[in-house]
Image (spheres, rainbow, N blue to C red):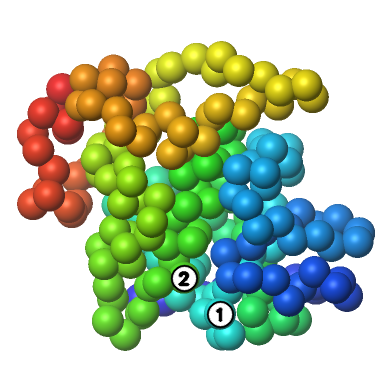
Amino acid sequence: MSVILEKKKAVGASPSINVRLGSFALDNTPLRFETCRERFAKHFNEKHNKFFFKHGRDKGVEVATFVRKIEDILGLNLNQRSKFSKTNRDTILWVESSVFWSKCPMKRSLYTILLRAGLLYESEKDNLEEALFSEKYVKRTKRAVMRFLFGFTEYNDEIISIDGTGVPFNTGWVKIFEKKNDDFLISNLNFSARKYKKKSLTHELSKCLWMK
């Protein structure tokens, strides 16, 4: 079932609107889209958790539906779920991430990856797993993504590197989890205390990743 988008959010005039798909922009004047996820993550945070997302023509509903399905798998309650709105541009979606995603740099980074995976989702095919595992950064951190989707959503490691402006720069999902072994995943992605129901992806996940 597709997501019903909220009321429209206006996108102001900006020369940066014609950017590549998967770009992000905070609601600033002038509007500036960022094509790099990790550069955007320095500005996307718990305080600034609403932004524009560039997608294919009339694909906004499918991106929103994909993210909502991921949130269904995670068993998030209504307060933990994202909200999405149409804009006056048929290639730009307004995204309001919840505190579940925005409070943690690691989750913020993964969230931007999931939005990009949503660009590959087709509601008629309902190809959630195909879209998810076709995204290049998910491919590079597949076992970490799978463990996260089984409810191990609490990141347990410390932020150890800070740039000159006081912004963590090594907290990107790929930076943290690419080429890490199962022991690292088990130690650093912990089970959430909230009630959780395992729903899918069991055929691909080894027991050692979700039963410890």
In this figure, which residue is indicated by the disc labeled 1?
Answer: 56
* Whole-number angstrom distance, CA of label 1 to CA of label 2: 7 Å
- Residue at 58% in and 85% down: 57
Is 120 placed left or right of 203 in the picture?
right
Q: Which mark is residue 119?
A: 2
Is 11 placed left or right of 178 in the picture?
right
Q: Where is residue 2 in the image (x, y as percent from the top left)?
A: 41, 76
- What is the three-letter code of the residue carrying label 2? Leu
- Local secondary structure at mark 1: loop
Q: Which mark is residue 98?
A: none
- Residue at 58% in and 59% down: 83
Is 157 placed left or right of 104 in the picture?
left
- Residue at 27% in and 73% down: 127
95 lies above or below 107: below
Identify the image quadrant of the N terminus: bottom left
Identify the image quadrant of the C terminus: top left
Q: Is residue 148 visible?
A: no
Within 10 Å of the Cα at label 2, are there few (<14), some (14-19), or many (20+) other Cα atoms? many
Q: Is residue 48 visible?
A: yes
